Amino acid sequence: LQWYHRRVREAVVSTQSTGIEVTFDIDANGIVNVSARDKGTGKEQQISIQSSGGLSNDQIENMVREAEKYAEADKVRKEKVELKNQAESVANDTESKIDEFREQLNADEAQKMKDNIAELREIANDDEKSADELREKLNEVQQSSLKLFEMAYKQNMANNTTNEGGDSTTHDAEYKD
């Protein structure tokens, strides 16, 4: 490598006083190809520089074996993270809907739903709980919220029907020009 640096310095110095064209090329494997061409004589020299460091085949094989060894644990961890994100999203959406429809919701039912959401968050944040336990609680919260908001929707529809129907008595009126 010292030889390389000396040659590059020589090439740079000689480029300034004569017409030498130096080209550096680094390929995808990290190999540096250097070529120098004297414009006056047309002579050209090339050198390739490869890293002597890097991983040996044994090190690569060990890394692959280790990755395969932990693949199942990584899969389980990934599933739990995805479920945790989904649980947080469902919890946030449900809480915002509870606030939005609080007038149509039964207060006790809304509080039960908030308690369910709190339990869901506890399970999601507990590393000791399995993905299956989280999935089960997530499904429970989703089903409960569907029922709760279905009741709110029916209550809202009943209120709108009553308001539209209003007073059913008719009043006679006369019109004069």
Image (cartoon, helix red, strand yellow):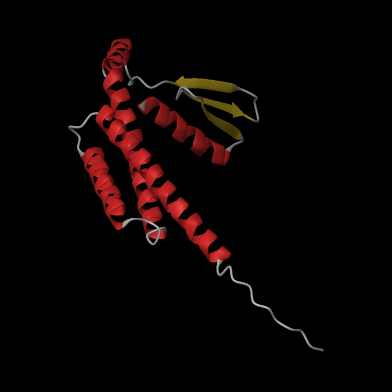
Number of numbered markers: 0
Q: Quadrant of residue 135?
A: top left
Quarter in which the C terminus is drawn:
bottom right
User: Percent position (x, y) of residue 60?
Assistant: 32, 15
Q: In the image, 71: left or right of 48?
A: left
**For residue 173, side relative to residue 83 (left or right):** right
Frontmost residue, 79 versus 87: 87
Vertically, is 141 above or below 101?
Answer: above
Say which quarter of the image contains residue 65: top left
Residue 11: image x %, image y %? 50, 33
Closer to the camera, 37 or 54? 54
Q: Which quarter shows the N terminus?
A: top left
- Residue 144: name its quadrant: top left
Image height of 28 relative to 155, above or below:
above
Q: Position of residue 136 (x, y in %)?
A: 29, 31
Q: Residue at x 50, y 37 (%)?
A: 12
